[in-house]
Structures are given as C-alpha cells and as structure tokens.
Amino acid sequence: MSSSPINPEGLVPSKPSIVGNGGMAQVIRSFAWETTCLGQLQSWPDSLLQSVNLILFTRFPAAVFWGPKMIVFYNDAFLPLLGERHPSGLGKPAREVWAEAWHLVGEKLGRAFHGEPIFEENVLVPVQRSRQVEDVYWTYSYSPIFTAGGGVGGVFVVCHDTTQEVQGAAQLRKNEEKLRTFVEAVTDVVYRVSADWSEALQVEGRGFLPDTHAPDSDWFQRNVHPDDQPRVRSAIQKAIGEGSIFELEHKVQRLDGTVGWTFSRAIPVRDQNGNVVEWFGAATDITARKQAEQALLNAEKLAVVGRLASSIAHEINNPLEAVTNLLYLAEQTADPETKSKLIAAQQELQRVSQIAANTLRFNRQKLLPAPMDVLDTMQSVLNLYEGRLRQAGIQVTFEKEDCPQFTALGDEIRQVFVNLVGNALDAMKRGGILKIRIRPVTHWKTGKRGVRITLADNGHGMSPKIKAQVYKPFFTTKESTGTGLGLWISADIVHRHHGLIRVRSSEVEGSSGSTFSLLFPHDWTAGG
C-alpha cells in the first residue's frame, strides 16, 4: 500500500489524531503533553485537534493558543518568526514565550479569547531575537476558536512580519515612530532609562509620576519611595548583571505627594553587537489593589484580635471571681491588720477585673449613649494606674473645672483615657510629669458647647514620621508589648462621637514630650 501524504503510516486514523508528515506534525506527536495542563494527546477535545491540524496544513505562518493559559502550538511556516524560541516555546503559555511583548499583545489576545476577532496592520511589537530586542512590524489576526459547546477554547493566530515593507516606506522616521508607537500602545507610565539606570531619559508620567523629557539623574531618589529603594536597587543590579527583564512591585512617591504602588517592568534594548544601550519600561498604578489587600488583611487581623481578647477576658474572669470570693470569706474572720491587707488585695483585684472587662468589650457592640461625668471617669482611670504611676516615679497634676455631664458611650470614652494614660506612662520610663486638664469649652467655629481634655507628658516624644502613623491599625513602636491598636481604636471612638483628636510632639532634648487634645460635643447620639 502506498504511503498517504497526510499519514506517516499510510492509514486513515481510526480516531482523531495529529496528522501530516511535516516537521512540526512529528514534533507535536512526540511531545510529552502529559507533562502539561492539556494532558495526553488522546484526551484532547476534537476542537483542539482540528485547530492544530488546520495550522499544520496551512502554508502561512499560523499558531494556536489554547485554553486559559494560552498553550502555544505553531506550524512549520511559523518557525522563522520564533528564532531561538523553538522548540522550547511549544507547549508553553504564550505569556512566557513572548514575555517582552506581552504588555502590547496580551490584552488583545484576551479579547479574542472572549469572542472578539482582532485584526491589526503594520503594528510595531518589539520582540527579542538573538539576545536583543528588535523593532518588528506585524500584520496579524486573532480569531476565537469555538468549541462544540459554544464556548471559546482558544485563539487562532495568523501573522506576517511586515518590518521591511514599513521601514522601506519610512527609514527617516524610524526612531520617532518607535517611541511614539510604544508610548501610545499603553496607558501606563512609560519610561526609558540609560544602560546603567543612572539617568531617566524619558518618562511619560500619566499624572501618576512626574514627566521627564531630558536626561535626569535624580529620578530614582524622587520617584522611588525611600522604604523600597534598597530593594529596587537590588532588582536593577540583578537585571543589569543578567541582561534580563526587570520586574518588581514597589512603592513610589506619586506626583501629588502621596505614597503609591506600581508594578514596573523594563526590557533591555541592545545594539547590533548585543550590548545594552538603554531600557524600555512600563509602570502600572496598582495603588488601589494594594490598599484593598491591606484593608482586607487588617480586617482579618482585627477579627482575630477581637476573638482572642474575648477568650482571654473570659479565662481571666473565672479565677478572678473565685479569688475575690475567697478573700471576702477570709476577711470575715481576720484580725484588723490582716483584714486591711485583704481589703487592699480586693481593691487590686477589682482593678484587674476592670482591665479584663475592658478587654472583653473590645469585641462587643456598645450600648446606647447616656450622660457621663468626664471628671469621675478620668479619676477612675488614674486610680487604675495609680500603682504603676507611683512605681515609675511619675507625678500627676489634674487641673479640672466643673463640666456638665455630656452624652456619650461612657465605656468607650473611658477606653480612650486608658489608652492615652497608658501610652504616657510608657513614654516616661525614667519618670516625669503627666499634666491632665479638663474644662468646658465653646467651639469657636460652630458655637456649640463641649468639653476639652488635654493630656501632656514630658517623655521621649515622637518623630514627625511616627506621629503621622500613630492612628494606623497595627502600627506600634513597642515591638514586644504593643498591638498597634490602642490609638487607632481611640481615634475611631472620638470620631464616632463627632469629636476631634489632635497630637503635638517633640523629641528635642529639654522640651520633649507629647500632648494629646480631645474635644467632645456636649450633645451627641449614636449615628447622629
């Protein structure tokens, strides 16, 4: 029997298979597909087999990108376009095979994979060949491949290198067109830097970063956030040393002065001798995503802290109640001297019980607002800390003026006072003076009555950088003992009471310390 032109064994296959005698047909048949996400060839859907057979019998350069990962297949006519990507590109995701051009073609391939046919003519898509990025113009078509079920299984790619035609029509505008096409192809920040990254040659900041249209040696210090500069420098040096693509997520100083996040990616541009002459890059603003991730992380942490606080408080309350009862029984039959000591012990246990109660409230919804006496509340907090203040050598001065009761969630206001007094105590490790002043006030702007509470210590103070972050959750300077929640919770309580909280601080020797000022309105209702 004579050999069939489409079957190496001269037989019509009994079940769907890869057919043909061409080089790529044989390579695809012998490829270890079981090591990929597609599995063994015998398990492939008919739509994939038919599509691959179609490109194998197409004389025009053609490829199939299959599945969500866009696994790459190509025919013999496509080999000159691949260069050193063959044979390693077969069976790999298209994003890996054309990594340097993915920011230009990935979005269009995604649209085709969702059912939209794409056609582009004479489009500049730089590709890496022989270890250098070359300007290549393409005319290409992306067509969705529909499966028997009506969905899209992959993308049928037909392309043609039109570089010679385009360059023949325009050699004098080559450099200008290269940059213009590159910049217009993306909406992200686009930049060019020197071979050693010491100068930014051009930055199109898109309102996210400052624009640069002349060589700038200060771009790194100005744009990259100080916290991330060592990490970015390390990644740059690695890319320079290996001549590889630079890729990194890092913080930046945005044009408006705030801190942002970017995903930055740059490729080396080489001359005819293979030497890197500059880098082309694009930077995407990912600030919103990073903020959302951090907010979710904080919410998860707070939920865990709340549950842990409740658990600990419950565990403490049971033995506290037992010990308190035992002390009471012992007091009934004790002599006067022992009785006075037992009473003092009971008072200390009451303080511990109050701490446990405050911890338990961390994870509970608060009750309705009611009139409260701010002077009595502050005095009770000072009584709670009396022992620690005395042992630390801290003198407390309490200046108070008669204040009418004001409406508030009393337990929450007490929690604010506990946090602020505790922080002042921690700031004065070698003793000092804590000045507290409470007085009625009238808001200068609204004319409404309220009460102002001021707590001033002469401890070590805070730097401007630390002061700017004290109300952020989980930010703490007390690494071994702090949770970073106290001032964040306090600020939240004050704001929910429609109040104001301000802080002044200095680290200057001889006048160091921090002053917290609270202002609460006289009348307030929850949610109102």
Image (cartoon, rainbow, N blue to C red):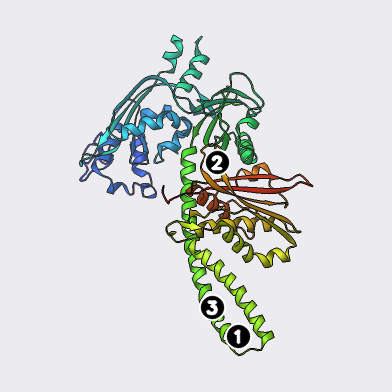
Indicate the amino acid at tag 3. Pro
Whether residue 479 is visible, yes or no, is no
Mark 2–mark 3 distance (CA, rounded to whole Å): 47 Å
Q: Position of residue 386 (x, y in %)?
A: 67, 66
**Image coords of residue 507 (percent x, y):** 73, 46
- Residue named by callout 2: 443
> Quick one: 104 or 244, which is closer to the camera?
104
Q: Which mark is residue 331?
A: 1
Amino acid marked by disc 1: Glu
Closer to the camera: disc 2 or disc 1?
A: 2
Dot label at residue 508: none
Residue 325 lies, with reference to residue 424, above or below; the image says below
Q: Kindly indicate whether the residue at mark 3 contacts the one at mark 2 (C-beta within 8 angstroms).
A: no
Q: Amino acid at mark 2?
A: His
| Residue 185 place in picture, x, y as percent | 44, 24
Numbered disc 3: secondary structure = helix
Q: For mark 1, does the 10 Å Cα neighbourhood hold few (<14), some (14 to 19), or many (20 or more) residues?
A: some
| Label 3 sits on residue | 319
